[in-house]
Image: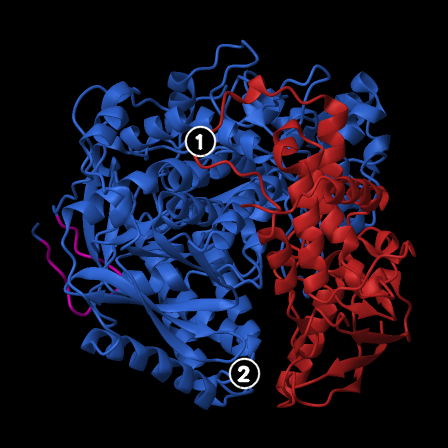
Amino acid sequence: MKLHLKIWRQKGPSNAGNFVEYDLADVSPDASFLEMLDQLNEQLQTKGEVPVAFDHDCREGICGSCGMMINGVAHGPKKGVATCQLHMRTFHDGDTIVVEPWRATAFPLIKDLVVNRAAFDRIVQAGGYISVSTGAGVDANNIPVPKKVADQSMDAAACIGCGACVAACPNGSAMLFTAAKVEHLNLLPQGKAEQYDRAVLMVHQHDAEGFGGCTNIRECEAACPKEISIDFIGMLNRDYYVGTLKGAGKRA
Amino acid sequence: MTTTTSPTVKTMPVFTEATLDAGIPSGPIEGKWEKHKFEMKLINPANKRKFTIIMVGTGLAGASAAASMGELGYNVKSFCYQDSARRAHSVAAQGGINAAKNYQNDGDSVQRLFYDTVKGGDYRAREANVYRLAENSSAIIDQCVAQGVPFAREYGGMLDNRSFGGAQVSRTFYARGQTGQQLLLGAYQALSRQVAAGKVELFPRTEMLDLIVINGRARGIVTRDMVTGKIETHLADAVVLATGGYSNVYYLSTNAKGCNTTAIWRAYKRGAFFGNPCFTQIHPTCIPVAGEEQSKLTLMSESLRNDGRIWVPRKADDKRRPNEIPEAERYYFLEERYPSFGNLVPRDVASRAAKKAIDEGYGVGELKNGVYLDFAEAIKRLGLEVIVDRYGNLFDMYANITGEDPYKVPMRIYPAVHYTMGGLWVDYNLMSTIPGLFVTGEANFSDHGANRLGASALMQGLSDGYFILPYTIGNYLAQNKLEAVTTGHEAVKEAIAQVEDRIKKLLNAKGKRTVDSFHRELGRIVWDYCGMGRTAEGLKIALEKIPALRAEFWANVNVLGSHDELNQALEKAGRVVDFFELAELMCIDALHRNESCGGHFREESQTPDGEALRDDENFAYVAAWQYSGNDHAPILNKELLHFEYVKLTQRSYK
C-alpha cells in the first residue's frame, strides 16, 4: 500500500505545531497502525529527520498508552479497538490519513502525538479505590457477588484509561472514564461503604481538572475501544445526586 | 566464598565452587515462613515514617509493595517509565491467577500447588520459596476481592475457577481474559489511595538508569525524566526493583515494547548477581509472525487450552482448509503424546511439541509456521454462548489481528518468547547480593525454576509485594543502622557521570543505522541460538556474533534529537545497549548449563522420546553470575538446590 500522511508535529508545549506531510510506500495491509508509524520513523531517521513521538506500549489493546485522532476519529475508523489494534487493511491503497494528538484542555500536549493524561490518575486518587489495607481481606467466598453484578462491574472495569472518550467529546468531558471507574466499584458489595463519597469526590476532581460537562452526546461511547456504555454515566449521576443530598464527599 | 576468574577468554567461564547461602530458615517446610515472620525484627509505627523506600516499577510486584509499604507508614517513591502506574505490563496478563483455595473440592492444597510448581519448574526452583508462594496464594485472592477485583463468578455468587497447564485441578481465578488488568487496577487503586494519603509519591515517565551503592549498600537511583531529559538523584534507605523481565532481548516477544532490562542490568553491574539468565519461557499459544514489519507478538491465553484442541494435519504440507480435513487425518499431538495432561501440558513441553511438528513440515497457514487450536468441538459441546462468555475478548483480538474468524476456522498458533524465569538472584528475604537492594516479581530469578506454570506470575508478583516485602524490608531496616547520605557523595557523582557519559556517547555516534535495526538483528541471533533449542556449537557462534554486532552498534548507530527533550530513540538506544550485554551473559549461561531443563533445551541432552533430560548430579543449582568488569568473564557462583520434599524425577506428563 501507498499512503499519504498528514501528521501533527509539535516540538513541545510552548512551540507552535503544524501538520507535516509524508509519503510512505510498501505498507503491508497486515501491519498495525503503529507498525506503519514505526516504518515511517525508520524512513525519517534514515534521512536524518527526527522521528514522530507517540505513546505506545503493550500493542495489544490493554495498557491504554496509545491513542490518536485518525481522520478525526479517536482510535480511527474501526469500532471497539485501540490504535494499536487497528490494522492497515482497514485503509485503501493511496489513502490520505490525518493523524493528530488527543486535543483537550485537561490533556496538555507534550510532543507531537504525546499528551499528558495525569488528570486521570488524580481522579482515581480522589476516591477510585476501596479503603482496605493489605491483610484485611476476609475469605473471598464470604462476599458472594451474583454473576450478573460481577459481569456488569467487569464491563465498567474494562476501561483502559486511554482518554479516547475525552478526545471524542465536543465538551472535552471525561465523564465516561469517571463513571466507569466509579461504577466498577459502586456496583460491588465491597464498594458500597464508600459509594456516595466516591461519586461526589471523583466528580469534583473531574471538574477541577478542567474537563467539560456531559451533555449526552454519546461520542465517547462510540469512540471507546472497550465499548463501555454511557449507562454507567446514568448510574454515576444517580450516585452523585443522592450523594450530594446526603452531604457525601467529605472524608473527615 | 572463593572465586576465580579468567581475565581474557569471555566465552568460557571458570567454574567455581563458591556457594551462595539463601538464608532459608530451618525447620519443616510448612513452618518456615511463620517461624521466620516471628523471628524478623519489627520497626515501631512512629519510626517507620523516618524511612524512605524507592520502588522501581509499578506492575503487580511493584504497585502492591508500594501500596502496602505506604499503608505501614513508610515514605515511598514509586517510579515507572509509563505515563501512568496503571499501564505496567502486568496489565496484559490474560488468563488468571492460581491459588490453593480448593473451592472446587477437587483435591487441591498448598502442598499440591507447591508440588506442581516445583515439578513444573523442572526441579530448578528453591523449595522453601515455592512453598511460601503456595501458602500465600489464598490470601492474595482474599485481598484482591476485598479491593474490588471483579473475578468471574458462578450464578450463586461464588468464585469460578478454570484449569491451566501442568495441573490436574482447577485452581485458576480469572476476570474474563483480562485478569492481569484487573489485578493491576486493584493494586493501582491501593497505590492511589496511598498517594492521596501522602505516603507514596509517583514519578511516571521516569526511567531508572543506575543504582547508587554507598558503603556496599543500595542507597538510591539515578533517573532520567523522560519529558525534560533531566538527570536526577533519589536517595533512600532501601531500593526495590520490580522492573519485570527481559524477553525483549529477542526483539519479538509478547512483552510490551518498553519492557527492558536496564534497571536490573545496571544493578548487576553494580554487584548484584544474576540468576539463571538463560531460563526463558516460550509460550505455546501466540499468533504466528505475519511479516517483516511486525513489531511484537500477541499471546493467546493459555486458558484457551481448557477447551481448544491442538492439532496439525497427519500429512505433511497438506494444502486443504482445516474444515476439509477429516477427523482421522488430524494429529492431536499433545493428546496422543501426553494422554494424562493432554492439551494442558506445561508451556515448555507444548512449545517444543509444536516446534517439532512445524520443523517436520506439518505447519499450517500461508507461511507454514503455525499449528491449529480448534474450538469446533467445544462449541458443539458447550454452545457458542458459553465460548463467547469465556473467551470472547481473546477471539475478538485474534480476529482483529489475523482477519480470520476463530469461531468458524481454527486459530493458528505458534510459540513465542513470553517470560523470563531468570533474573537477579535473591535470598529468602528477596534481597539481592547488594544489601538494601530487593528484587521482586519477574525481575528476580526466584520461584519458577526452569519453567513457569501458567497463572503463576501474577501469584508471585502479588505474593512478593503484598505479603513478603513488607516484612523483610522492615527486618532489614531494623537490623542495620544506616548512615545519612547526601547527593554530594562521590558514589552519586560517579553514577551520574556514567549515565551522562553514556547518553552523550549515544547521541554523538551519528552513524547510519537506526536503533531498531540493531535490535532486530540482535533478537534474531538470540532467537536462533539461545531460543527454543540450544547447542554448544550454536551458542559459541552467538558469542562471536553478539560482541561483533555490539561493536558495530557503538560505531554506527544513529540517534537523532537531543538529550533534554522527550526522545524515544534515545530511550530505546539505552535499553538496547543493555540487551546486548545481557544477551552475551544468557549465552554464556546456556553454554555452561550442559543439561536440558524446562525451557532450557540443550539439544545434546534429551531422552529418547525428545523430552528435556536433566543432569541433577552436576546442575542441581542456581547459576548466579557476578560481574567482574567489561573485559572479564563473569564469575559463576552456585546456590545448591536441595530437594527434601519433592523427589527429583524425570518430569512426566504422559
Q: How many marks?
A: 2
Q: Quadrant of residue B491?
A: bottom left
- Residue B565's disc is 2
- In front of the other: B189 or B618: B189
Residue A115 is situated, as x and y percent measured from the top left of the image, at: 67, 71
Within the magenta stretch, is there residue B6?
Answer: yes
Look at label 2 and name its amino acid. Glu
Chain identifier of the blue chain:
B
Q: Residue at x 70, y 25 (%)?
A: B307
In the image, residue B140 sits, relative to residue B492, either above or below, namely above
Helix or strand or loop: what does disc 1 sit on?
loop
- Indicate the colour of chain A: red
In the image, residue B644 sits, relative to residue B596, either above or below, namely above
Residue B256 is situated, as x and y percent measured from the top left of the image, at: 58, 56
- Residue B611's disc is 1
Look at label 1 and name its amino acid. Glu
- Chain label for disc 1: B
Residue B212 is situated, as x and y percent measured from the top left of the image, at: 27, 67
